[in-house]
Image: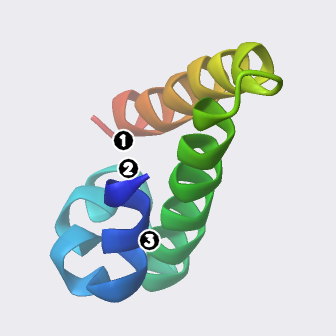
Amino acid sequence: MASGIAHLLCPSAFESVNRMAFTDRIRAHVLINGSIEAGLGLALLNSRTRRAAVAATVVYLTYFNASLLYRL
C-alpha cells in the first residue's frame, strides 16, 4: 500500500520504471499503477477480501511484467 501511495505523492520517482514498460502517457500509467497498488494493499489488509486481492495482485504483476518483457 505504501508503494501505491508513493506513486501518487511523488510520481516522478516512478516514471523511469514505467517508461521501461509503457511507451506513452507515462505519468498517467504511474498514477493508475499507484492507485491499483494502493487498492490492492488495502484489500490485502482485510481478511474478507484477501483471497481476491491475492488473485488480483498476481494478475496485476503478470500484466506489468508482460508489458515490460514485450518492450524488451
Instruction: Tell me the distance, in whole angstroms, between the alpha carbons under discs 1 and 2.
Output: 6 Å
Q: Which residue is at 32% across, 56% downward? A: 3
* Residue picked out by circle 3: 30
- The mark nearer the N terminus, 1 or 3, is 3
x and y percentages locating residue 21 in the rendered image? 38, 50
Mark nearest the camera among 1 and 2 is 2
**Three-letter code for the amino acid on which mark 1 is drawn:** Arg
* Residue 25 in picture, x, y percent from top left: 51, 81
Label 2: which residue? 21
**Quick check: 58 above or below 3?**
above
Side of 71 where 57 appears, left or right = right
Circle 2/circle 3 CB separation < 8 Å: no
Query: Callout 3, which amino acid?
Result: Val
The x and y percentages for residue 49 are: 80, 27
Give the answer, above or below, for where 16 lies relative to 63.
below
Q: Closer to the camera: disc 1 or disc 3?
A: 3
Which residue type carries mark 2?
Ala
Q: What is the crowding at mark 3: few (fewer than 14 residues within 10 Å), some, or many (at least 20)? A: many
To which quarter of the image does residue 10 belong? bottom left
Mark 3 and mark 1 in contact (Cβ < 8 Å)?
A: no
Direction from residue 12 to residue 64 in the image, left or right: right
| Image disc number at residue 71 | 1
Dot 1 crowding, Cα within 10 Å, few <14, some 14–19, many 20+: few
Q: Residue furthest front?
A: 47
- Give the residue drawn at x 22%, y 85%: 12
- Front residue of this view, candidates 59 and 66: 59
**Front residue of 64 and 51:** 51
Q: Secondary structure at mark 1?
A: helix
Q: Can you tell which quarter of the image residue 69 is in?
A: top left
Which is closer to the viewer, label 2 or label 3? 3
Tag 1 near tag 2, CB within 8 Å: yes
